[in-house]
Image (tube, rainbow, N blue to C red):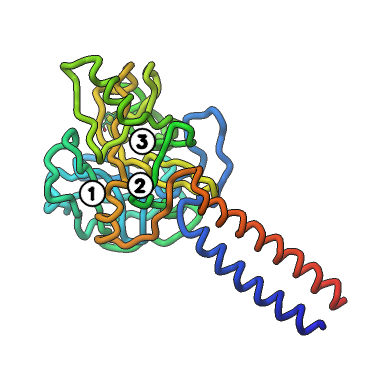
């Protein structure tokens, strides 16, 4: 009798660990003490965020997708073959001052779509291979990437993060804490209509772009935030990257939301170069929900079995 319960305990703990290992792989910050209503992110809240610099200082944001790969925007690398002056800082919370776990990495190569010319024409994505791998810590974790069919909608909780300007041409002051902002996704038709309100600044919202922000303006990403991630929380609580900061017409102006490269439209491109696990984006995905419920059930079963085994053996 006791032997049987030990067998089940070991078996369920094994299955549970396997399951949790899968679920914890990406998109889950380990430090969850976020300050509500503050625009400065708390320590370790966005452990995939990186800062891309060249000899002159800050260039763009980006984010970790694998131990030796960063995702950013093509426009951050006007000459993808001349990358010797670039340095990528990982594990950062503040731009100035000390960051625990901070490491810096030079770039081995930058992969940009062959057809890329200008961010306003789309394909604004860069896959950046690091010369040395990052080491996972509480402050350094990869984000989850979406599948090609993942959908992100205005009812999801989505955030942008970066060390860019806090208003048009006003740089971040002091120690430069990483900034975070919750932004709703704007569907492409509504976004296109907003840009059409001023035909001189009209752009074509292409299939590989998406918009996020506020029609009334006031809150937005800004110069220096581009290349950085737009992430949305899915039903299992993890964060999936929906967009890459691409461009805008100024910052926080009415009817001029930020435009982001749509990561799901590059799912196959990323997969073929980097090969990372991808997640469905929709919070209404039934398969996702079944997985979450099953994981919760297994966790409960493990707890019950361990308790029962302890009682029976004592
Ligand atoms: C930029 O230049 C930039 N308001 C980023 C975001 C936006 C505009 C410009 C969107 O990095």
Of 133 and 200, nearer the camera is 200
In front: label 1 or label 2:
1
Tell me which numbered mark, 2 or 3, is placed earlier along the sequence.
2
Give residue 74's position: percent from left, percent from top. 20, 44
Query: Label 2, on which residue?
Result: 50
Give residue 5's position: percent from left, percent from top. 76, 78
Query: Disc 1 and disc 2: Cα gap in Å?
Result: 14 Å
Whether label 3 lies within 8 Å of ligand 1 gets the answer no
- Residue plotted at (38% across, 27% down): 213
Q: Which mark is residue 126?
A: 1
Whether label 1 lies within 8 Å of ligand 1 gets the answer no
Of 290 and 34, nearer the camera is 290
Q: Residues within 10 Å of mark 2 (few under 14, many from 20)?
A: many
- 35 over 91 or under it: above or below: above
- 166 over 43 or under it: above or below: above
- Residue plotted at (25% across, 53% down): 127
Query: Label 3, on which residue?
Result: 163
Q: Which mark is residue 291?
A: none
Q: Quadrant of ligand 1?
A: top left
Query: Disc 1 and disc 3: Cα gap in Å?
Result: 19 Å
Label 2 sits on a secondary structure element that is strand
Q: Is residue 49 something that shows in the picture? A: yes
- Labelled pair 1, 2 in contact (Cβ < 8 Å): no
Whether label 2 lies within 8 Å of ligand 1 gets the answer no
Query: Disc 2 and disc 3: Cα gap in Å?
Result: 10 Å
- Residue plotted at (61% across, 67% down): 16
- Residue plotted at (36% across, 59% down): 66
Of 3 and 93, nearer the camera is 3
Label 1 sits on a secondary structure element that is strand
Looking at the rendered image, the quarter that the C terminus falls into is: bottom right
Tell me which numbered mark, 1 or 2, is placed earlier along the sequence.
2
Q: How many marks?
A: 3
């Amino acid at each position: 009798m006791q032997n049987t319960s030990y067998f089940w305990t070991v078996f369920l703990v094994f299955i549970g660990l396997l399951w949790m290992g899968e679920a914890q792989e990406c998109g889950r910050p380990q430090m969850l003490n976020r300050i509500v209503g503050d625009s400065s992110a708390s320590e370790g809240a966005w452990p995939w965020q990186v800062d891309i610099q060249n000899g002159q200082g800050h260039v763009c944001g980006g984010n970790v997708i694998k131990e030796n790969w960063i995702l950013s925007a093509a426009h951050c690398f006007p000459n993808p073959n001349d990358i010797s002056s670039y340095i990528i800082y990982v594990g950062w919370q503040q731009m100035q001052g000390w960051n625990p776990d901070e490491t810096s990495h030079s770039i081995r190569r930058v992969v940009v779509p062959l057809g890329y010319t200008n961010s306003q024409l789309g394909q604004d994505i860069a896959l950046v291979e690091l010369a040395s791998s990052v080491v996972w810590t509480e402050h350094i974790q990869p984000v989850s990437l979406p599948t090609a069919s993942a959908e992100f909608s205005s009812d999801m909780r989505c955030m942008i993060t970066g060390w860019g300007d806090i208003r048009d041409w006003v740089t971040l002051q002091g120690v430069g804490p990483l900034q975070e902002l919750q932004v709703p996704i704007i569907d492409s038709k509504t976004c296109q209509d907003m840009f059409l309100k001023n035909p001189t600044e009209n752009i074509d919202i292409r299939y590989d772009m998406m918009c996020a922000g506020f029609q009334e303006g006031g809150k937005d990403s800004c110069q220096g935030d581009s290349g950085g991630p737009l992430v949305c929380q899915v039903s299992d609580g993890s964060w999936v990257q929906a967009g890459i900061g691409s461009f805008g017409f100024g910052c926080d102006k009415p009817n001029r939301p930020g435009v982001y490269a749509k990561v799901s439209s590059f799912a196959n491109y990323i997969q073929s170069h980097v090969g990372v696990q991808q997640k469905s984006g929709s919070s209404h995905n039934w398969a996702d929900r079944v997985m979450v419920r099953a994981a919760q059930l297994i966790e409960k079963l493990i707890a019950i079995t361990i308790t029962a085994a302890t009682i029976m053996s004592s």
